[in-house]
Amino acid sequence: MAKHKKPPRVGDQPAFRRSLIGAVLVVTALFIVAPLVVIGIEASSRGWSVYSAAIAHPDTRHAIFLTVLTALIAVPINTVFGVAAAWAITKFDFPGRRLLLIVIEIPFSVSPVVAGVAYLFVYGLQGLFGPALQSADIKIMFALPGIALASMFVTAPFVARELIPLMQAQGRDLEEAATSLGASGWRTFFSVTLPNIRWALLYGVVLCNARVMGEFGAVSVVSGNIRGQTNTLPLHIELLYHDYQTAGAFAAASILAVLAVATLIAKVLLERQGAGRGGRPALAAPQPASETAT
């Protein structure tokens, strides 16, 4: 009997495979690599003295400081929120569980500019809580609190989205076993749950931090774009570019470019450890019953 030949798959032909790989490399070079190279060339084109002077400018230094400070506020809060949300959704059954999943996804479906405008209508002078905040002499919009709130909204899902699929795949068996042996909730979390999600958690934190430092849309609405006061680094780059200060703009942009490359390297290293959605880190080895119960 003649053997039935399997139908050819798409991409089996060497010519097609080479063409596809070549097209991907060309697109990557034109749209990803080329802008980074241009930033590096333009930032250093006028020499180190001009570059260092642009970075050392008070407005640029304040923009860097404000960006880092915003990240130091937003990332830890979103990390705690992501862990708590993932823990609640994957380890417990309760009414509104699916609704909570939908709410966590909202920042990905809402434009950052729309989110910034929404915060204005809530915390601005003409907003819902504006008069009360003004009477209490509390300033949220066009100040650090508004920038931090907008950044937290945009980056809220990052940690949770990395942890939820992993924790669902791991199930509840280990936690239930630790609880049955007398371990407290916190002991169960730190001894069983956290070791099993540590790489995915760090992966989500890295992505969250990169997005906070690079956020533009929502922050541009709530910050007021006050030079040297409420401009984060992305807003400061736009301001310098509009003022035709190209050397300063590219120098500041090089900082974000270095951050992007560092984030990519960290992402690759974490993925090799099994972090992220593409990998499943191995479960931590169960502790002896005598240690777990203490």
Image (tube, rainbow, N blue to C red):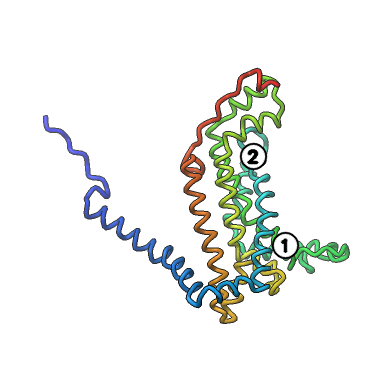
Q: Where is residue 213 in the image (x, y as percent from the top left)?
A: 61, 60
Nearest to viewer (mark 2 / mark 1): 1
Compared across the picture, whether 202 is left or right of 268 comes to: right
- Check the image and name the residue furthest to the front: 49
Q: Position of residue 261 (x, y in %)?
A: 49, 58
Which one is nearer the viewer's eye here, 17 or 111?
17
Which residue is label 1 attached to? Answer: 146
Which one is nearer the viewer's eye here, 70 or 216?
70
Q: Is label 2 in contact with label 1 (beta carbons under 8 Å)?
A: no
Q: Position of residue 244 (x, y in %)?
A: 56, 81
Question: Which quarter shows the N terminus?
Answer: top left
Which one is nearer the viewer's eye here, 52 or 9?
52
Look at the numbered disc 1 and give the secondary structure of its residue: helix
Which residue is label 2 attached to? Answer: 97
Task: Indicate the amino acid at tag 1.
Answer: Gly
Earlier residue among tags 2 and 1: 2
**209 in relation to 250, above or below:** above
Q: Position of residue 250 (x, y in %)?
A: 53, 72
Q: Residues within 10 Å of mark 2 (few under 14, many from 20)?
A: some
Compared across the picture, whether 258 is left or right of 96 comes to: left
Task: Indicate the amino acid at tag 2.
Answer: Arg
Question: Which quarter shows the C terminus?
Answer: top right
- What's the mark number on residue 198? none
**74 in relation to 35, above or below:** above
Look at the numbered disc 2 and give the secondary structure of its residue: helix
